């Protein structure tokens, strides 16, 4: 299933037209002509993708020597069709900041898909429960989108399509680069190691990538509309970016330290003792996820400015770095070398994005990095306390170890709240 989803996503991202982002960023995105244009762009792309995956599925099956992959890919790719047929009015709801509508569509479909997969898993106990659940998720989103955001397809106007494509030109190749960066490790590990080892690695990485992906999606759905409304006001745009970065660092760094030190315990409690062997991959994935969230916030500023090509350059470099490092690191270090390659690549790409934002919004680099020292020092303090207490027998078992980590995180959050309260009092007294 990891191979099928990765291959399907690869083909899906290769021809992404960025219609949703273009509709949200465009000042005319609420007009009927542009809504219709977005619908036909996504629908025609989805149909083309389904046919392409259907034709190429046997080739992937032969490459991995697994006859089940072809049929599995053809079923899973139905989700591409459902995703492409979602009502474009759901995207307009995001643009107009009626987030409850998109949340109902997106999260409602996700909940129904998970329930379907779990219910089928109890009885089927094989990969088809995941495949059908994945399709059910996007099918539910499609149905909910028309129930909550009604839309009737009309004939498109080519002027509106050209208008949306002007933004989309900056996205050409972006999703492919992003996929190479995010999924090369799966293909390499799947070729070099057994399906069981790939399964252990994938489940460990998904344990953090799933909630991190949810956070990124929520940010994308709120940040792009918010930043697009102030796209011509650099001062407000920078203020939004700095405040969000500070909050992310304060919340994310302690959580990352907790996940790194408790990786083995988390995997043991979540999946069982066998999965503890993938703890290094989980720890590296946590670090990469935090940097990816911070990187994504700068990306949304580029999108709001109508400059997605700036992000594309950064992701292209990340993809090249991942391609160069994944195979030798996986071969030398084992499966967890795949996440090490991803972490190094995201560090390079994130550094480039921080440098580029200065020329786009006038943000001072020193001002951006100013939000990091205190959270970093506090997180180092957590690491020191963890090293001190971890030698005691009482925290040698998984559950007490996790509880101690949560307590240290809570202590850090209380300290952050106290510091913020003191800063607010000082600022108020100066006024």
Image (cartoon, helix red, strand yellow):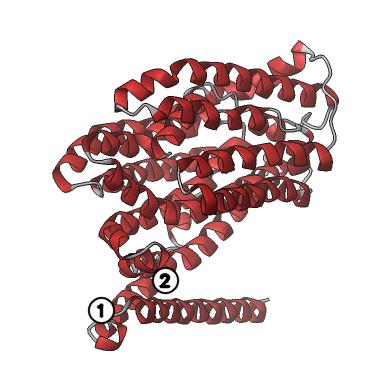
> CA gap, disc 2 to disc 1?
20 Å
Work out whether residue 260 or residue 223 is closer to the camera in this orientation and state it: 260
Residue 26 quadrant: top right
Q: Which mark is residue 361?
A: none
Which residue has dot 1 on it?
387
> How far from the left and from the top, in percent, is residue 149?
82, 39
In the picture provided, is 108 more to the left or to the right than 291?
right
Q: Position of residue 284 (x, y in %)?
A: 32, 55
Describe the element under mark 2 as helix, strand or loop: helix
The earlier-in-sequence mark between 2 and 1 is: 2
- The answer, for residue 352, to whether it is visible in the render is yes
| Residue drawn at (43%, 33%) of the image | 4
Please give the name of the residue rendered at 79% of the width and 35% of the height, measured from the top-left corner: 89
Disc 2 crowd rating (10 Å Cα; few below 14, some 14-19, many 20+) is: some
Label 1 element class: helix
Q: Nearer the viewer, residue 177 or 185?
A: 185
Vertical side of 371 occupied by 340: above or below:
above
Can residue 174 be seen here? The reply is no
Quadrant assignment for the C terminus = bottom right
Query: Circle 2 sits on which residue?
Result: 374
The residue located at (28%, 44%) in the rendering is 338
The N terminus lies in which quarter of the figure?
A: top left
């Amino acid at each position: 299933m990891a191979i099928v989803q990765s291959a399907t996503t690869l083909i899906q991202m290769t021809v992404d037209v960025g219609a949703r982002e273009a509709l949200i960023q465009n000042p005319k995105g609420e007009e009927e002509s542009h809504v219709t244009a977005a619908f036909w762009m996504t629908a025609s792309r989805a149909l083309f993708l389904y046919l392409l995956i259907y034709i190429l599925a046997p080739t992937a099956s032969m490459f991995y020597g697994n006859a089940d992959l072809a049929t599995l890919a053809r079923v899973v790719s139905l989700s591409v069709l459902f995703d492409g047929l979602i009502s474009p009015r759901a995207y307009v709801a995001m643009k107009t900041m009626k987030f409850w509508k998109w949340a109902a569509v997106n999260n409602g479909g996700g909940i129904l898909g998970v329930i379907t997969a779990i219910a089928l898993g109890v009885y089927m106990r094989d990969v088809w429960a995941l495949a059908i659940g994945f399709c059910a998720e996007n099918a539910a989103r499609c149905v909910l989108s028309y129930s909550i955001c009604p839309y009737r397809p009309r004939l498109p106007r080519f002027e509106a399509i050209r208008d949306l494509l002007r933004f989309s030109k900056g996205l050409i190749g972006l999703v492919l680069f992003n996929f190479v960066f995010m999924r090369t490790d799966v293909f390499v590990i799947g070729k070099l190691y057994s399906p069981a080892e790939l399964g252990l690695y994938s489940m460990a990485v998904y344990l953090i990538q799933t909630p991190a992906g949810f956070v990124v999606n929520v940010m994308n759905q709120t940040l792009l509309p918010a930043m697009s409304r102030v796209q011509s006001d650099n001062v407000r745009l920078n203020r939004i970016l700095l405040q969000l970065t500070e909050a992310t660092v304060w919340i994310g760094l302690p959580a990352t330290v907790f996940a790194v030190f408790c990786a083995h315990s988390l995997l043991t409690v979540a999946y069982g003792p066998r999965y503890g062997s993938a703890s290094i991959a989980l720890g590296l994935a946590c670090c990469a996820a935090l940097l990816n969230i911070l990187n994504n916030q700068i990306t949304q500023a580029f999108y709001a400015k109508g400059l997605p090509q700036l992000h594309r350059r950064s992701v292209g470099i990340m993809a090249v770095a991942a391609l160069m490092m994944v195979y030798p690191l996986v071969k030398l270090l084992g499966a967890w070398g795949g996440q090490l390659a991803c972490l190094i690549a995201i560090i390079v790409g994130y550094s480039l994005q921080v440098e580029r934002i200065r020329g786009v919004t006038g943000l001072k680099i020193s001002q951006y990095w100013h939000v990091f020292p205190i959270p970093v020092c506090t997180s180092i303090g957590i690491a020191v306390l963890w090293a001190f207490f971890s030698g005691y027998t009482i925290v040698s078992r998984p559950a007490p170890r996790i509880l101690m980590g949560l307590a240290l995180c809570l202590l850090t959050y209380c300290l952050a709240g106290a510091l913020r309260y003191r800063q607010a009092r000082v600022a108020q007294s100066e006024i």
